[in-house]
Amino acid sequence: MSRKRYSFIILILGSLATISPFSIDMYLPGFPTIAKDLHTTIDKVQFSLTSYLIGICIGQILYGPLLDRFGRKTPLYAGLFLYVVASIGCAMTSSVDQLILMRFFQAMGGCVGLVASQALVSDLFPSNKRAEVFSMITLVIAVSPMIAPTVGGYVTVGFSWHWLFIILAGIVTIMIAGIYFFLPVGQMPDKSVSLKPKSVLSSYFTVVSQPQFLIYTVAGGLATAAPFAYISGSSDVFMNIYKVSEQQYGWIFAFLAFAMIGSTQLNHFLLKKYKSQEIIKTTLIYQSIVGFILIIGVYYNWFGLYSLIGMMFIFLTGQGLTGPNTSALSLAPFKKHTGSASALMGSWRMGAGAIISAIVSILHNNTALPMVGMMAFCSIGGLIILSLGNATVLQRAANRDVEEGVSVLL
């Protein structure tokens, strides 16, 4: 594969994986306007974010077996078409409850990009290159927070929030054409993969029975949910507490995206010297410390606008290191069940994100404490799960070696 084609395929895969982040980030600056227009409150509008994350969680579970059974492209087209229709529905809503519902269906369609892109990485690239490819895809994803909120702020002010969803529908329509003409097919349809509930559950059970998958998916999913606490709470914190405008909020969001972009590039070089396991553990320790400082600082009012942004930047640098490495290690043990494994991994990540964002909304108290508190919780929780999981696996291996030694002696 030529370098040019290699880069172009990664760009397409990154664009697919960016659909949901872009759909989330682009409408954040419009929260106050949406709440006013629909005669509701910002915390109620925040539940449209939660419903989107729930849709991603459920949708990925469904797409996993479909991608294994019918190949990569057919489910991909179906999901993206649903996304376009639901996006138009979001633009036409007249109540917050309708918006919450349409965002759910929008997510059910768009999440196919997340699952398919991860499965195609396993289809198209050798195992020793996947962490690097995931890092490059994460780089494409990281550009989304730089562009989406800034565009969203200007569109909301210059036109209306309804146009945000029309633009999203147009972008994905263009993607469909690009996928048709330029994206490799990947794994072909496998008729041996059954879609009967018992068979699907058996496939998922096979996936979760793999200790490496379970440890890095659960720990990594919780750790990578930290940005959802930030995404859910940031519009309220910056626009209502610190009184920044929609455009200023977009630029703050874009600035903080540099944290993930820089660390994504750093991961590319770190992988040449260190194992993914080492990078993940060190990063979670680092983020746990910074998260604890954020909690103390917000509680005692140490931070103004710029110092809070600075500390958030420092914390978010870890996201570009944790996500790609946990993804690569989670999927590494699989060949036949790659689609199902990708679906479970992505579903857990978005499910954790949905829970975290909902908790931030529920704990809303007109301070930044719910946001930074849940960010710290995600990193500390991920570190604890990773440490306990690896310790358990090592202990079981040691016990198995002892039992095998005894049986040999007998």
Image (cartoon, rainbow, N blue to C red):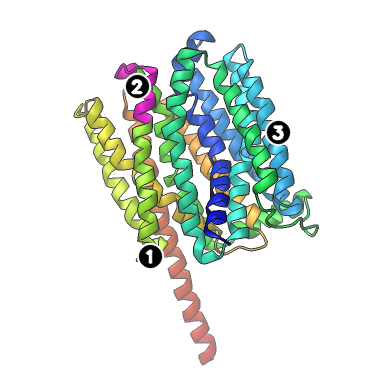
First in residue order: circle 3 vs circle 2: 3
Q: Which residue is mark 3?
A: 81
Q: Which residue is mark 2?
A: 248
- x then y, percent, for residue 198: 76, 52
Give me the C-alpha separation between circle 3 and circle 2. Answer: 33 Å
Assign the N terminus to one quadrant of the image.
bottom right
Give me the C-alpha separation between circle 1 and circle 2. Answer: 38 Å
Chain part drawn in magenta: 240-253
Which residue: 67% across, 36% down? 80
First in residue order: circle 1 vs circle 2: 2
First in residue order: circle 3 vs circle 1: 3
Q: What residue type is disc 3 on?
A: Phe
Residue 247 falls within the magenta-colored stretch:
yes
Q: Is residue 243 above or below residue 397?
A: above
Categorize mark 3 by other alpha carbons within 10 Å: few (<14), some (14-19), many (20+): some
Which residue: 31% across, 18% down? 241
- x then y, percent, for residue 353: 49, 38
Quarter where residue 142 is shown: top left
Q: Is residue 382 left or right of residue 172?
A: left
Judging depth in this view, the residue of 368 and 186 nearest the camera is 186
